[in-house]
Image: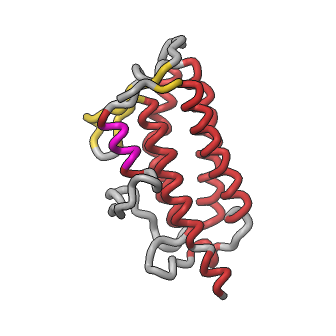
Amino acid sequence: MKPVNKAELLRTLEDRVEEHISETIALFQNRGDEFLNTPSATGGWSIAQCLDHLNSYGDFYFPHIEKQILNSEDANVAEFTSTWFGAYFTKMMDPETGKKKYKAMKGHIPASDLNAANVVGEFLRQQELVMSYLRQARKKDLNKLKIPISISKLIKLRLGDVFQFLIAHNERHMQQAKRNLIREKAV
């Protein structure tokens, strides 16, 4: 894989997270449980389920990210290079390049009746947390820090790949959640 400018990559990821925060506040934050828990007209997840699914990934990855960031030395490294595996996972999840549908992994399947306000609040809290990690990562070597993946703790990805995967995954499910808003316009 080709090296990319680390600062530009982190800025791009921060912009995407900012967008997710803004959209969540504007579109979902002050909605009731009934609206947020209504399944998709196509039988897919509700808005709350989409966000709860993303929260479950944050619950897994964020403690690992925090540990790596806190326990590593600052490094003046200007570039990041994805691994083939990391780029593949990101491409798979990114809604622009990964058009295939996937079944949620065990442990990441959301319940159908959720406290939607809590789910939205937790999603916003986690997005602020990932923003903090992205800012702290400016001083870290994204190539050197390794994070286990949720399907096997034996497999580890570079921190830069994990950030890209998580934010692409968030984008995928934010788009899915926003498609549920179309039903509101149809009524």
**Furthest-front residue in this view:** 2
Is residue 174 shown to the viewer in this render?
Answer: yes
Is 46 drawn above or below residue 81 in the view shown?
below
Q: Position of residue 171 (x, y in %)?
A: 53, 53
Q: Position of residue 66 (x, y in %)?
A: 51, 30
Give the camera-side residue of 170 and 79.
79
Give the camera-side residue of 8 and 156.
8
SS majority, magenta? helix
Q: Position of residue 119 (x, y in %)?
A: 59, 60
Residue 115 figure quarter: bottom right
Is 77 drawn above or below residue 88 in the view shown?
above
In the figure, is residue 42 to the left or right of 132? left
| Colouring method of the image | secondary structure
Residue at 57% x, 38% y is 13
**Furthest-bottom residue in this view:** 187
In the figure, is residue 157 to the left or right of 112? left
Magenta residues, start to end: 85-91
Q: Quadrant of the N terminus?
A: top left
Is 50 drawn above or below residue 69 in the view shown?
below
Residue at 30% x, 37% y is 85
Give the camera-side residue of 156 and 9.
9
Is residue 51 shown to the viewer in this render?
Answer: no
Q: Position of residue 116 (x, y in %)?
A: 61, 66
Residue at 48% x, 32% y is 65
In the figure, is residue 49 to the left or right of 108? right
For the image, the number of numbered tags is 0
Q: Quadrant of the C terminus?
A: bottom right
In the figure, is residue 154 to the left or right of 90? left
User: Is residue 54 in the magenta section?
Assistant: no
